Amino acid sequence: MEFKYLLFEIKDNVAIITFNREDKLNAINGKMFDEIWEALDEAKNNQEIRAVVLTGKGRAFSTGGDFNQASEGMAGDVDSVEDGGKMQSGELEIDVSQKRIVLKMNETPKPIVAAVNGLALGGGLNLALNSDLIYASDSAQLGTFFMKRAIIPEMSSTYILPRIVGIHKAKELIFFGDRFSAQDALDMGLINGVFPADQFMEKVMEIAIKLAKGPTYSIGLAKLAINKLLRDKIIQALENEAESLFKAFDSEDFTEGLLAFFEKREPDFMGR
């Protein structure tokens, strides 16, 4: 498969999906969200593929949503929450191309490994959180980041993150949005392992190939059995996050956060 913003290859029955906006630190625009979904759909349905690795080109895994596109919204070409689309939350109809990625990752009966090679911030971290296993380079830095721009965490992270690190630690990570190291992430149980940067992809591929050579049908059944118990809560989290995100978009602090981003300065938030 060929994409504009992704690299896609199959090696030893492993699909390697590489975010390919290196000059933008792999920030994700609407078209890239759509391509990620298409790549995951191919990985789900291609019989040759038995495991998936997500990673980034250059020094970032992904720095999340592309703020240069913020005024246009983050959605691509979508039609329904299950297979491409829109979510109803009260009277709000919200484009959710990034939300359908969560559901696609959740329902794909093949192990998905996030290879966090560098910066993983905001939505980039959330992509990793929705994977089945997460490994990071020892040079990687991670962070929820959203509050740096006065916006709300999304992609079901308000449900997933507290389940991994505990409620109070999750609130700390979300409220402050500061970066933390791969070792810190390992210590808090957020990721499965840390590898030296110069051996990183080699080590991750060893794990992915081991998975691909394993009983992947049964691995898939186990994954789906676990995820079915989480699915209703994940969908509810997506709805809650979307509703809160729209409220945040109407706030003065969001406007200030956006201006600060474009003016390359620290924001002066007013709490309204």
Image: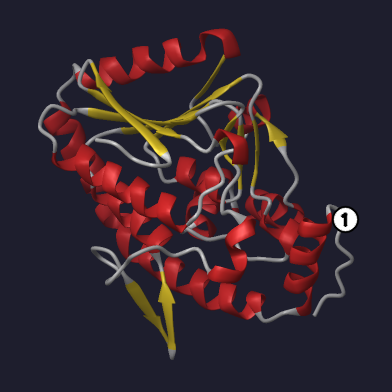
The amino acid marked with disc number 1 is Glu
Give how far across and how far down residue 203 sits, in percent. 44, 12
Q: Is residue 196 visible?
A: no
90 on left or right of 27: left
Give how far across and how far down residue 200 sits, in percent. 51, 14
196 on left or right of 82: right
Q: Quadrant of the C terminus?
A: bottom right
At mark 1, the secondary structure is loop
Give how far across and how far down residue 163 sits, in percent. 50, 50
Question: In the image, is residue 211 above or below residue 155?
Answer: above
For the residue pair 143 and 20, the one nearer the viewer reads as 20
What residue sits right under mark 1 in the picture? 266
Give how far across and how far down residue 57 sits, in percent. 51, 28
**Measuring 40% from the left and 67% from the top, which residue is drawn there?**
96
Q: Residues within 10 Å of mark 1 (few under 14, many from 20)?
A: few
35 on left or right of 162: left
